[in-house]
Amino acid sequence: MRLLAIALGLALLVAPAARAEDGYDLWLRYKPVEAAAKGPYAARAAAIAPARAAETPTLKVARAELERGLTGLVGKPIRAAAGSRDGVIQLSVAPQAGLSDEGYRIRTEAVNGKTTTVIAASKDIGVLYGVFRYLELIQTRQPVDKLDIASSPKVKLRMLNHWDNLNRTVERGYSGQSIFDWWRLPGHVDPRMVDYARANASIGINGTVLNNVNAKADSLTPPFIAKAAALADTFRPYGIKVYLSARFSAPIEIGGLKTADPLDPAVAAFWKAKADEIYKTIPDFGGFLVKANSEGQPGPQDYGRTHVDGANMLADAVGPHGGVVIWRAFVYSHEQPDDRAKQGYSEFKPFDGQFRDNVVIQVKNGAIDFQPREPFHPLFGAMPKSNLGMEFQITKEYLGFSTHLVYLGPLYEETLRSDTQAHGKGSTVAKVVDGSLDGRKLTVMAGVANIGTDRNWSGSQFDQANWYVFGRLAWDPEADTRAIAADWAKMTFTNDPRFVKPVVDMMMGSREAAVDYMTPLGLHHQMGRSHHYGPGPWVAGGERADWTSVYYAKAGPDGLGFDRTPSGSNATAQYAPAVGACYADLKCVDEKDLLWFHHLSWDYRLKSGDTLWNGLVKRYGQGVKYVDGMETTWAAMAPYVDAPRHAEVTDYLKIQRDEAQWWRDASVAWFGSFSKRPLPPGEKAPPKTLQEYEAMTFPWAPGI
Ligand code: BDP
């Protein structure tokens, strides 16, 4: 016994100090498979054969990842030729029928009568994706003895959009500073950039926009091009291209021109030269992302030109190099007092068919702005002759920042599965995004990143799941987000079903809970002014009406909600007739979208039989209750989770619980001042006066 203790003590002394779990390893932890389950995996992953292909940088990292993963999961694999023994894994690059360039096939085959797992693809990048998939199978304890898997991404450009500034602040970032260390680049490339690339490649992300859409022209100057090139070199083996947000007025700011008019030949020449310069240092540069004539950003309309003029001019600059222009449809102007929800459609729909083939119009999932719930954007399905991409927000600007546990899978899935009915039933948003509805090839799914310098990358352990699910859906927009949550939970924490089931259930309901305690029944944009932290339903006045809460809720003694039916702004007319008619019809519209489309009296009867007022108050309470439930569930998970991560999540849930209550109380106080109706039985009066809630200010809220 003593001897054993001494031996153990020695082993501890010589073993490398185990790093506490802090979330850095994301879903790529590669912890040893439990002894009882290990056998079959070890048998199928005992050796790695020399790759059947020239050793490219991508194959090198694929092999390194496989070795690293297997070493962690089942023990260090040896090297052996395929066919020399059972349990060899063979990486192979060879033309694969029925797979796209990035697709992969994993098959169990007999080579010389020996069982071999072949991970094959037409291009090396497919092999890397296949390796990650194989490791995922082991990490999630799927059988690997008789594999026959083929997978190709359904969307071509699967991208992160970083809203990162050149001084390392991050617009709407809640996880520390920008991970891109612009100041020290290109001389020093933080090794973390490799882990960033690994994580993205593991979920199929193949592009990243390095800088904020509210862009500075400096990002296009030679020093910054060199910095971007250093990142591009680091990401290249992982199949990730870099893109830059381009400021439309750059020809004036860094080009010495007097105008940025897209039809001015000198302006077009500036952009052509700029593109040539970038491609000289970054030969596989992805292209430009542009926010033009939106929220004060410069654009072609400043010169009486159109989005088409601006986008096509830039497209002609990058086109010869194989680049694309991603032009955002998130526009709403100072001049038009129209319902903000209508403006993107009104501005872009008439241009369908006029954009160059290498232009993609990137559309936010909803017509306002990344709210906890929005009906799908009416542009989906409305521009069949244009490339239309999806923009989701992964960072939770409007969903409680990084301290609220909100799994966004159901939000993304709800939008992607919405039926635009553009060509009759089944014309889902997913089919617009993957291009299949109108036979489009250049497809995009973008996510506004939630990544920063925090050790856990995303600001919270559970926000990693939002990065993860985004990537998985970009690969397959029709994937099931519950299954994805389960994969994530298993890899990130444990395969123990006593953990996976309750935690996945908790995640799946968490978004609906946030909708309930923030903006139930179709309410939207009720957050604090500008930082969007906490409740601010009273926000009024200021620069523009559509930056206020009162504009969206339209609360009054008569009732609540924004009338977007034909009797109101008629935004419903922007949808396919059957869809719009349903939204406009109180008998058809789903109550989750009720106040988005309708202005209703406080006594309107909900399906539950409650009045609108009573139903609203109850919804807020339901949201708070759900967070209570999450706290209880999580407390019971302590045996399955390492102490540091368990404690962090526990702390955050407490913050969320308090803030959910605050949302409920402040909203009830505010809307109650209009409804003037008593609270439904059992509902507590807000503990503070309305004036006290209104007086709370947060000048240091993060992310601005
Ligand atoms: C809004 C954000 C703002 C962004 C803008 C955008 O509040 O910070 O610049 O979207 O998408 O949601 O351009």
Image (cartoon, rainbow, N blue to C red):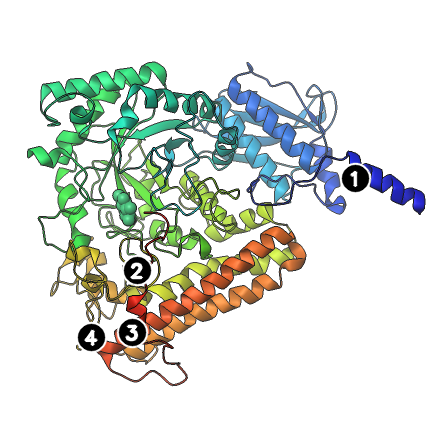
CA distance separating discs 4 and 2: 20 Å
The type of residue carrying mark 4 is Gly
Give above or below for 614 relative to 40: below
Callout 4: SS: loop
Asked whether mark 3 and ligand 1 are closer than 8 Å, the reply comes as no
Q: Position of residue 492 (x, y in %)?
A: 58, 46
Give the alpha-carbon distance from disc 3 to disc 4, as whole Å: 19 Å
Q: Residues within 10 Å of mark 2 (few under 14, many from 20)?
A: many
Number of the front mark, 3 or 2:
3
> Does any portion of residue 29 appear in the rendered image?
yes
Q: Residue at x 44, y 45 (%)?
A: 175
Query: Badge 1, how many Cα within 10 Å: few under 14, some, many 20+?
Result: few
Q: Secondary structure at mark 3?
A: helix
| Residue that badge 3 annotates | 690
- Residues 681 and 586: in front is 681
Mark linked to residue 549:
none
> Which residue lies under the disc numbered 4?
559
Q: CA distance from mark 1 to mark 3?
A: 59 Å
Marked residue nearer the N-terminal end (3 or 4): 4
Disc 3 vs disc 4: Cβ atoms closer than 8 Å?
Answer: no
Mark 4 or mark 1: whose residue is earlier in sequence: 1
Q: Residue at x 38, y 85 (%)?
A: 681
Q: Nearer the viewer, mark 4 or mark 2?
A: 2
Q: Is residue 586 depicted above or below 106 in this figure?
A: below
Mark number displayed over residue 12 = 1
Dots 4, 2 in contact, CB < 8 A: no
What's the distance in space between the residues labelled 1 and 2, CA to CA?
A: 51 Å
Q: Which quadrant of the structure image shows residue 289?
A: top left
**Residue at x 64% of width, y 30% of height:** 68
Taking the image as drawn, is residue 148 in sight? no
What amino acid is found at the position of numbered circle 3 in the picture?
Leu
Which disc, if any, is residue 527?
Answer: 2
